[in-house]
Image (cartoon, rainbow, N blue to C red):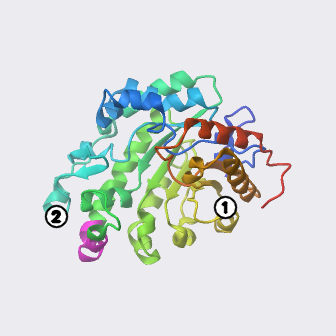
């Protein structure tokens, strides 16, 4: 549904996220602030990942770096989905992905998890949001906050680190479903508090990353994913920000994802937006260029971006990648993509 406070002077991203079929697709890219930018690598050379996340001035600077290069319609806060977990008493390291030294498998470990108050979770995130909003004041750029979905956070907590198919976690759901539900309930409340804190600090939209939802069959997702995502997203209703949900490799779950109380659904590159649209007739679609396209020649980028833009016609569309920017992406290819999207008039083009 449309936000009654949104006007034609509101940032284009927010207008589309609230359901307006805008004449141009607003554009931002997942992982737009990161390793493909030399200015990011310069900071990374002198600061660890946690130092960058936990130092508001650095997190704000990295968030703003792509906005200085490209006329994007939204910034997404530089952080990580694991950021709120240390406040529960779970040490997190990155090597290079997240590592939990003692994977959670027992009732005693679960009971030891504390549920922090919102101001305790990650105060440096709130400060970084305020710094970014100050820099963006008066500019037509929205700031997106985000969090990991409970099922995805549980995946890392139980598995302990990245894995191809997360067999330990999938077995845990079957072997200890009661424990799994207790864990998911705690993570749900943590996520609600964390996202509310971001909104209060100035985030103008929020995205819930359910990176590993696609691992599960529909019955498993219906049991361990859907009700907790519904609770998180419902708790944010009425706060004046559009809610975006992302699940990767989850096209088999689309009938269930359509039940989520959110304004926008971000989809990966595996299906055309024209194929996805019937599942989400009341939602804005976000996506879904294959990130690997940005490694191709400029004429290929133009061709593939036009395919996505035409497939996104027939309803509100936010242009994005189907997942994050690949680290070897040339920045000039991103600049070309932005130009292509800006030149595409959605109200004068024919659908694919």
Quarter-wise, where is residue 149 in the image? bottom left
Residue under the image location 43 percent in, 64 percent down: 213
Image position of 178 with respect to 161: above or below:
below
Kind of element beneath mark 2: helix
In x, y percent, where is residue 247? Answer: 49, 60
Q: Is residue 227 magenta?
A: no
Residue under the image location 31 percent in, 58 percent down: 162
Residue carrying label 1 = 273
In this view, the residue in front, 16 or 2, is 16
Q: Is residue 45 left or right of residue 37?
A: left
Q: Note whether residue 82 is visible.
A: yes
In this view, the residue in front, 292 or 146, is 292
Residue under the image location 26 percent in, 71 percent down: 172
Image position of 252 with respect to 61: above or below:
below
Residue carrying label 2 = 107
Q: Give the extent of the magenta segment.
A: 170-180
Circle nearer the N terminus (2, 1): 2
* Extreme residue in the right direction: 348
Which dot, 2 or 1, sits closer to the camera?
1
Q: Note whether residue 18 is visible.
A: no
In the rendered image, which quarter contains the C terminus? bottom right
Kind of element beneath mark 1: helix
In x, y percent, where is residue 16? Answer: 68, 46
Image position of 91 with respect to 322: above or below:
above
How many residues crowd around disc 2 within 10 Å: few (fewer than 14), some, or many (20 or more)?
Answer: some
Q: Is residue 175 magenta?
A: yes
In x, y percent, where is residue 40? Answer: 43, 31
Question: What is the CA distance from the residue labelled 2 to the residue labelled 1?
Answer: 43 Å
In x, y percent, where is residue 341? Answer: 71, 43
């Amino acid at each position: 549904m449309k936000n009654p406070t949104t006007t034609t002077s509101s940032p284009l991203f927010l207008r589309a996220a609230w359901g307006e079929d805008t004449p141009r697709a607003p554009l931002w890219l997942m992982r737009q602030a990161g390793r493909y930018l030399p200015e990011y690598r310069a900071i990374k050379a002198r600061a660890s990942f946690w130092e960058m996340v936990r130092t508001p001035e650095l997190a704000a600077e990295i968030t703003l770096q792509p906005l200085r290069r490209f006329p994007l319609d939204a910034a997404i806060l530089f952080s990580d989905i694991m950021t709120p977990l240390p406040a529960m008493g779970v040490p997190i390291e990155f090597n290079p992905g997240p590592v939990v030294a003692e994977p959670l498998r027992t009732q005693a470990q679960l009971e030891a998890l504390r549920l922090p108050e919102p101001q305790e979770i990650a105060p440096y995130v709130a400060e970084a949001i305020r710094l970014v909003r100050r820099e963006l004041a008066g500019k037509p750029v929205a700031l997106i906050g985000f969090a990991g979905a409970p099922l995805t956070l549980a995946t890392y907590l139980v598995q302990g680190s990245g894995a191809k198919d997360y067999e330990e976690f999938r077995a845990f759901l079957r072997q200890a479903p009661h424990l799994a539900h207790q864990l998911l309930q705690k993570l749900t409340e943590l996520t609600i508090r964390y996202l509310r804190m971001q909104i209060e600090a100035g985030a103008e939209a929020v995205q819930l990353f359910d990176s590993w939802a696609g691992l599960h069959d529909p019955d498993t997702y219906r049991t361990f994913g859907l009700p907790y995502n519904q609770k998180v997203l419902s708790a944010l209703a009425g706060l004046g920000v559009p809610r975006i949900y992302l699940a990767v490799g989850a096209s088999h779950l689309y009938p269930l994802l359509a039940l989520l109380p959110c304004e926008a659904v971000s989809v990966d590159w595996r299906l055309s937006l024209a194929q996805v649209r019937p599942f989400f007739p009341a939602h804005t679609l976000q996506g879904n260029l294959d990130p690997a396209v940005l490694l191709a020649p400029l004429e290929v980028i133009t061709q593939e971006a036009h395919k996505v833009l035409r497939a996104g016609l027939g309803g509100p569309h936010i242009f994005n990648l189907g997942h994050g920017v690949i680290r070897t992406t040339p920045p000039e290819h991103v600049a070309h993509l932005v130009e292509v999207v800006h030149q595409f008039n959605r109200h004068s083009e024919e659908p694919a």
